[in-house]
């Protein structure tokens, strides 16, 4: 298993606080069944997978930084526009 360092993750976030928020959010999504963005999962736990995704720069999409409730609100607004 490749070791993930905080320094590797911090290169892709705005600071330690945003790293913790992003990693926790992503780990929760992985634990709830979201597909990982890694080719080799190595049977790692969701928190390790989330940190590996961050360290490898896979989470550059701004939607990853939004909470689930923010995404639900945006979806509801889009659906309301189509009615």
Image: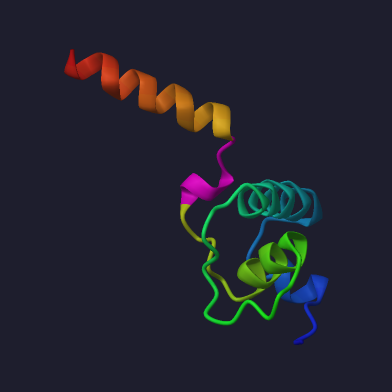
Between residue 57 and residue 15, name the one nearer to us: 57
For image coordinates 56% across by 34% down, the residue present is 68
The mark total stands at 0
For image coordinates 48% across by 49% down, the residue present is 62
Q: How is the image coloured?
A: rainbow
Drawn side of residue 31 relative to residue 17, left or right: left
Q: Is residue 63 magenta?
A: yes
Between residue 71 and residue 11, name the one nearer to us: 71
- Residue 35 % position (x, y): 51, 60
Looking at the rendering, the stretch of residues picked out in magenta corresponds to 62-67
66 w.r.t. 39: above or below: above
Secondary structure mainly formed by the magenta segment: helix
Drawn side of residue 63 relative to residue 67, left or right: left
Q: Is residue 42 magenta?
A: no
- Residue 60 % position (x, y): 50, 61
For image coordinates 34% across by 19% down, the residue present is 77
* Residue that extends furthest to the bottom in the rendered view of this protein: 1
- Residue 33 % position (x, y): 57, 52
20 w.r.t. 77: above or below: below
19 w.r.t. 65: above or below: below
- Residue 16 % position (x, y): 80, 56
* Image quadrant assignment for residue 67: top right
For image coordinates 66% across by 59% down, the residue present is 13
Quarter of the image with the C terminus in it? top left
Drawn side of residue 83 relative to residue 39, left or right: left
């Amino acid at each position: 298993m490749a070791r993930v360092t905080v320094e590797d993750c911090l290169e892709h976030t705005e600071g330690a606080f945003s790293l913790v928020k992003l990693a926790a959010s992503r780990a929760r999504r992985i634990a709830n069944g979201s597909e990982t963005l890694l080719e080799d999962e190595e049977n790692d736990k969701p928190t390790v997978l989330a940190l590996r995704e961050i360290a490898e720069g896979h989470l550059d999409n701004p939607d990853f930084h939004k909470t689930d409730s923010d995404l639900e609100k945006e979806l509801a607004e889009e659906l309301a526009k189509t009615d």
